Amino acid sequence: MKTTYAVLSEGLEKRFEDVHALRGLDLAVPEGAVCGLLGPNGAGKTTAVRILTTLTRPSAGRALVAGHEVTTAPAAVRRAIGVTGQYASVDGELTGRENLRLFARLAGLRGRSGRVRADELLDRFGLGEAADRLAGTWSGGMRRRLDLAAGLIARPRVLFLDEPTTGLDPAAREQIWTAVRALADEGTTVLLTTQYLEEADRLADDITVVAGGRAIATGTPAALKARIGAYAEVTVTGAGALPGAAAVLDRITGGRPVLDGERLTVGATVLDPGLTLPSIIRALDSAGIPVTDASLRPPTLDEVFLRLTTVKELAA
């Protein structure tokens, strides 16, 4: 079956005078998927989103969103997308209901259709009871949900979310995550940039890691974790045993040991797929390293991200 892509870029480049922000970015997001766009500061994520939402023209390459070329059919792209930025764009001097009705008018929904759509979204995001209070009196999480609702006024085919839960507490983040996952289940394509790797792990069907203006890795969270390998961690009985444990893990895992003097732990990525937990324990015992705990587990997405981006930076 042929895959239909809601977002597709090929060789996307962008220069700002002496800054080469994008260096041939390739991106493919299937319809109805949630794609996480991850990368360190300066990797080119924001530039890519600005191009895909028609706010900036690329220097080279091509990009299509909802089947429309961003440079030759920007109006068609804008009609097909919704955008929620890092900070809530709602007007604190208007009520929640007035905010959404304003966005409805801007989207071309007039009269009763705009009012109905606003009320529908208020109810959907659990904001109905506060709808007639000034948005400036709402909590940060409520304003972010209102901002997300505003981005959905025109029923976009593709929704761009730029760090949608920045600054929110865990409960508010969970509410946003539930809403985003529900949108994807209904068929909306979501391109998500985030600084919370847990967020990408929870929400994304696929992740593209960007560094130096290029995509350096793409895959499901599980596939990216498998690519990096397992993670070994041991807890020693005292700080004096840390160097010896690090030497053992360095030798048998092939990864670079990370020492934590407060927790008395040493961890390392395992590059040998045949390494087992019993063999780790035997190696430590043979070296006379006393340990109180040892584990061998899949890597976290944070560890995958650090490994991929560090390798990219070292190769640059």
Image (tube, rainbow, N blue to C red):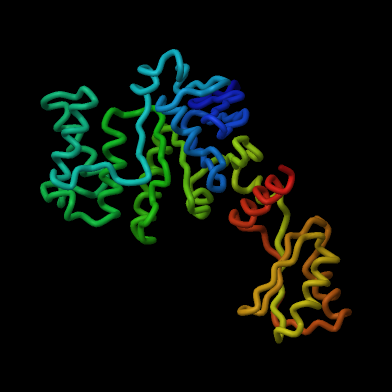
From the viewer's perspective, tell me whether residue 137 is left or right of residue 234: left
Give residue 15's position: percent from left, percent from top.
55, 28
Name which residue lies at 33% across and 22% down.
79
User: Residue lying farthest front?
Assistant: 18
Name which residue lies at 39% across and 46% down.
164
From the viewer's perspective, tell me whether residue 148 is left or right of residue 59: left
The answer to which quarter of the image holds residue 117 is top left
Name which residue lies at 21% across and 22% down.
108
Give residue 147's position: percent from left, percent from top.
28, 42
Name which residue lies at 58% across and 33% down.
20
Q: Is residue 196 above or below residue 232?
A: above
Give residue 160's position: percent from left, percent from top.
41, 35
Give residue 7's position: percent from left, percent from top.
50, 27
From the viewer's perspective, tell me whether residue 152 is left or right of residue 212: left
Residue closest to the eye, 64 or 158: 64
* Quadrant location of the N terminus in the rendered image: top right
User: Residue lying farthest top?
Assistant: 72
Residue closest to the eye, 137 or 159: 137
* Quadrant location of the C terminus in the rendered image: top right
How many numbered tags mark residues here? 0
Q: Is residue 135 visible?
A: yes
Q: Is residue 295 visible?
A: no
